[in-house]
Amino acid sequence: MKSLPLIAGLLLGSALPAATPNFSEHIAPIIFNNCTTCHRPGEAGPFPFTSYEEVAKRGKMIAAITKARTMPPWQAEKTAYPFSNERTLTAAQIELIQEWVRAGMPRGNAASQPPLPKFPQGWELGKPDLIVKMSKSFRVPAEGTDIYRHFAFPIGLPEDKWVRAIEFRPGARSVVHHALLYFDTASLWPTLDGKDGKAGFDEYNSPVAKRQRVATWAVGSNPRTYPEGIAVKLPKGADLVVQTHFHPTGKEEDEISTVGIYFADAPPAKTWTELQLPYFFGIGAGIDIPAGDPAYTVTESITLPVDVEAFAGFAHAHFLGKEFRLTAALPSGQTQDLLWVKKWDFAWQTIYNFQDRIALPKGTKLTARIVWDNSTANSANQFNPPRAIRWGEASTDEMGSITLDIVPARETELPALTAALRRHRQMTDASRVLSTDRALENGVAGLSADEAKLAKAVLGFFDADKDGKLSPAELESARANLRAQGFDTGLRRSSLPLQAASAR
């Protein structure tokens, strides 16, 4: 049979044979197993790839976007640490598609075409243990700016539960860009929900200690699953609060989101936490991107206080994002990439699950480097000519961070780990405040309430003589301290930012 040498060549990564590839024997297995999972009715793909006719109709496009590695959507480079959920085509598979299109996209023997895989119907992980749904739809207008809206999903279980997976399913996929899912014990939402006559509420400033982020969903995401032995606590009486980012598309849509929750059989042996550089998607990093800058860069580092194990990574920015790189400088002197996205695409965002947990010993220095492109060369730039862009939640603003999901190697060291992460967030706030010229030389005089709250925290760290302000010597000492901890204090801004990052 002619296809056997061809298939053997693909599996071995050798050069392609002279035989002409056809759809039934060679292309269908590639498309059905790598593309149809999204390109089928009811899923995210804008058109289906379930038959020869559907694929051949867009064959030239498929050849172009697979050659460019735009599809399947996967942005992370290969590193020493493989991912369990990687979805990429091999060089041989990409070339096979090229050969097929150049040959005129022959179908071959229809009897040789494999059946479509048995895709899950509805929930990707099977029937959830608990399903919660918005009780009222939210109308997304056809036009206007981006919308960030919170929705509460009452749960209120009579006992603690542990969650091993969670699946978010938007009702109106075309307008939902991403969602942040939190377990919330503050129970403040009933006083806010629907007060403006619409489902949900705009702001939800519950105390940080009363909420736990359990999942992030974005276009291109899979359900959030945790590896064996890791789960997230759903406390007794807690509810789910979801912040959803809507992007109007020119057509009114009604959104009703549904969430499936899967429980673990027992509590985990280790407690999961997030390490984010810069924290809260860069709110305190002084992001201030000049118009036309093709490589605006922010770096931030943290040194691990205890041994940890990393099991997943996530990158996030908006349209101007260009490159993300998270490296680990080990105590042995070796440096390894943990996550490297060379070509960011705002339209596709994924949690990258490591195939195996990565052991990162105490003393490892993690450094995040994020680059934005605010030039006309960036085809995703929303402004022409480019405008100066600062941190903000709208898609036309910017943010940026790399998140690493970790557990302590020893559960007894969790308090030391969480204390170090809290201290690092405080130092991020301090770095932002002290990036202004002559910062705090008059203490909190003239500052707004939010600015004063942030400034007082910084003074608590660096006001050596306790006179309520920073002298030139104290300011330089503070900046030197922050530089030694891996913060970039070279930014200069005309005034303090209006948002208090420590309140987030």
Image (cartoon, rainbow, N blue to C red):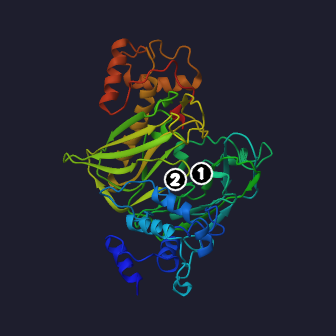
Question: As displayed, is residue 387 above or below residue 420?
Answer: above
Q: Nearer the viewer, residue 452 or 220?
A: 220
Q: Nearer the viewer, residue 122 or 450?
A: 122
Element at label 1: strand
Label 2: how many Cα within 10 Å (few below 14, some 14–19, many 20+): many
Question: As displayed, is residue 434 above or below residue 272?
Answer: above
Residue 424 percent location from the top left of the image: 39, 37
- In the rendered structure, which disc, 1 or 2, sits on the residue that comes first in sequence? 1
Label 1: how many Cα within 10 Å (few below 14, some 14–19, many 20+): many
Q: Determine which residue is flagged by label 2.
A: 349
| CA distance separating discs 1 and 2 | 9 Å
Q: In this orientation, does residue 245 appear?
A: yes
**Kind of residue at disc 1:** His
Quarter occupied by the C terminus: top right
Report whether 212 appears left or right of 196.
left
**Kind of residue at disc 2:** Gln
Residue 79 percent location from the top left of the image: 32, 55
Q: Nearer the viewer, residue 474 or 79?
A: 79
Q: Determine which residue is flagged by label 1.
A: 178
Q: Quadrant of residue 298?
A: top left
Q: Residue furthest left?
A: 332
Residue 432 percent location from the top left of the image: 45, 27
